[in-house]
Image (cartoon, rainbow, N blue to C red):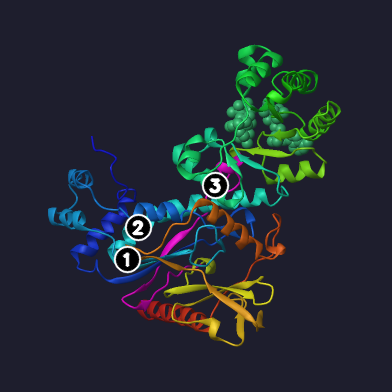
Amino acid sequence: MYSDDSLVLHTDAYQINMIYTYWKQGIDQKPVVFEAYFRKMPFNNGYVIFSGLERIVKILNQLKFTDDDIDYLQSLDLYDTEFLTYLKNWHLTATIRSAYEGEVMFNNEPLLQVEGPLVDAQLLETLLLNIINFQTLIATKAARIASVTNGDPLLEFGTRRAQELDAALWGTRAAFIGGFDATSNVRAGKLFNIPISGTHAHALVQAYHNDYDAFHAYAETHKNVVFLVDTFDTLKSGVPNAIKVAREFGNKINFQGVRIDSGDMAYLSKKVRIMLDEAGFTNAKIYASNDLDENTILNLKIQGAKIDVWGIGTKLITAYDQPALGAVYKMVSIDGDDTIKLSNNVEKISTPGKKQVWRITDSKDGKSEGDYLTFDDENPSQLETLHMFDPNHPVISKNIKNFDAQPMLHDIFVKGDLVYDLPDIITIKNYAKHSLNDLWDEYKRILNPETYPVDLSQKLYDAKMNLIHDIRNNIQEMTK
Ligand SMILES: Nc1ncnc2c1ncn2[C@@H]1O[C@H](COP(=O)(O)OP(=O)(O)OP(=O)(O)O)[C@@H](O)[C@H]1O
Ligand SMILES: O=P(O)(O)OC[C@H]1O[C@H](OP(=O)(O)OP(=O)(O)O)[C@H](O)[C@@H]1O
Ligand SMILES: O=C(O)c1cccnc1
C-alpha cells in the first residue's frame, strides 16, 4: 500500500505520459503559456464567481513527487528510471497569474494563466481544472440563490448530499464566498472560519415520541433554539408545542424560531407567522428547508411566504441543474509563438497568445462597461478612447471615453515562488459582493440575463484571424 502523502498524482495518466514524451524528446523545458477558461455560462447565468484559488495556492506551494509517488510510478513499468529521478527532482518554476477569488468573471476569458516550462503547465492542468470547475460552479449557484433572497439569511445544509467529503467542504466555502451566511458543516467552520449554524432533525422528536417532550428537552439543554415543527403535524402539533415550550422557558432560552421542512411552505409559513405573532413571538423567525433553490425561493416570495431564513442543501452543493462548469485549459503560446486550437465549432476556437483581461468601468460611477482582452503587453488604460467590438459580430461596437481599466489576472507565483498573500475568507466574501455590485442589474437577473461584453483588442482579434487563415491555408496546401 502507498500512503496518500501527496497530490501530484491527482492528475490524468495522459499528462504524465505527455511529460515523458517531452522529456525524452528534450522539449520539456520549452516556454509555454496555458490559460484556463470556460465557454458557456453555467445555469444560463450572466456571470460566474471565480473560486478555488486558495486551494490551488496551498497545493501548488508544496507540490512535489514523494518517494511513494515515484515507487508507484515505477511499479507501472512504463517509464525509465532516469525519468523517475527527473520527476523526483521536479519543483514548480512556472509563473501563475489568476483572477482573485470572489471576482466576477465571464465566459471566454482567462481565469488563470500558467507561464513556464511545458512540463509544469502540463502537470497542473487536471488539478487546476478540477478545483476551478467545482468551486466556481458552487460559488455561482450560491450567488444566484443569494440574488433572490433580499438579504435573508442563507444557511448551507448540503453535506449529506454532496459528492463526498471534498465537495461538501470546499463547496460550502465556495457557497459562503458566493453569498451564504453560515454552514451546517462543523469541519468547514473549524477549517475556514465560516459561521456554523443548525437547528435539529426529526430524529430528536422521534426520540422523545412527541413534539412537546422533544422541544422541552432541547430547551433544557440549549440557549438558542429553533424547533423543527413538521414531524407529525405542523399546525396542530409542531407550532402549538413550540409556543408552549417557549412560553414555559421564557427568558431562560433564546427562542429563535421554528423550521418547516415539508408541505406547502407558502401556506404553512403564513399560518405559522400568525400563530407566532398571536402568541407574542413576533421576533421568532420562520426557517424553511426542503429541496429549495433560487426558482422555488423566488416563487415562494411571489406567493407571499413568510419565510425569514432559508436552509439549502442538495440543489446548491450538487449544482443540481448544471453539474459541471466545463472550464478548459489550452495552450496559447509556445516558444514565444502564439498558438490556437481550431475547431469546426467556432465557439471552440481558442484565442491565441498570452493575455490580460481588463475590466473596463465607467470612471464616474464605477459600473462595468465590459471586459477587454489584450495581449499582455498592451495597456488600454493609457488610451483616451477605447474601441470595443463584439469579436463574433465586429460591426457591433462602441467607443468609450472616461473609463478605468483594471487588470484581472494577478501574479500569484512568479517562477515558482509564491508572491501572493492569501486573504481571509471575509475579505474574499466582501470582494465578491463589491465585484457583483459593480455589475449592472441586467447581467445579474437569474432568467435570461443580458450578455456581458467580452471583447478582444484589435491586435488580438487580428492575430486570431491571421492564425486561423494561416492554419487553414497550410492544411489546404498539405492536402492538395
Ligand atoms: N408553495 C410552494 N410553491 C412552490 N413550491 C413549493 C411550495 N411549497 C413547497 N414547495 C417545494 O415543493 C417541493 C415539494 O417536495 P416534496 O413533495 O418532497 O415535499 P413534501 O412531500 O411536502 O415533503 P417530504 O420532504 O416530506 O417528502 C419542495 O421542493 C418544496 O421546496
Ligand atoms: O432539502 P435540502 O435542500 O437538501 O436540505 C437539506 C435537507 O436535509 C435534511 O433533510 P433529511 O436528510 O432529514 O431528509 P428529508 O427532510 O428529505 O427527509 C433537512 O431537513 C433538509 O430537508
Ligand atoms: O441544522 C439543520 O437544520 C440542518 C442541517 C443539515 C441538514 N438539514 C438541516
Which residue position holds label 3?
323
Q: Nearer the viewer, mark 2 or mark 1?
A: 1
* Badge 1 vs badge 3, beta-carbon distance below 8 Å: no
Q: Is residue 232 above or below residue 119?
A: above
Q: Front-most of 294 and 256?
A: 256
Q: Earlier in the sequence, mark 2 or mark 1?
A: 1
Rounded to the nearest whole Å, what is the CA distance between mark 2 and mark 3? Answer: 22 Å
From the image, tell me which residue sits under label 2: 124
Which is nearer the N-term, disc 1 or disc 3? 1
Quarter of the rendering containing residue 25 = bottom left
Magenta residues (range): 315-344
Q: Give the residue type that dot 1 points to.
A: Ala
Mark 2–mark 1 CB contact (< 8 Å): yes
Q: Seen in the image, is 60 located left or right of residue 146?
A: left
Q: Are marks 2 and 3 in contact (CB under 8 Å)?
A: no
- Say what amino acid the circle numbered 3 marks: Pro
The residue sitting at 23% across, 34% down in the picture is 1
Question: Which residue is drawn at the image coordinates 48% and 69% (left, top)?
Answer: 349
Label 1 element class: loop
* Residue picked out by circle 1: 94
**SS category of the residue bearing label 2:** helix
Identity of the residue drawn at 63% across and 74% down: 361
Dot 1 crowding, Cα within 10 Å, few <14, some 14–19, many 20+: many
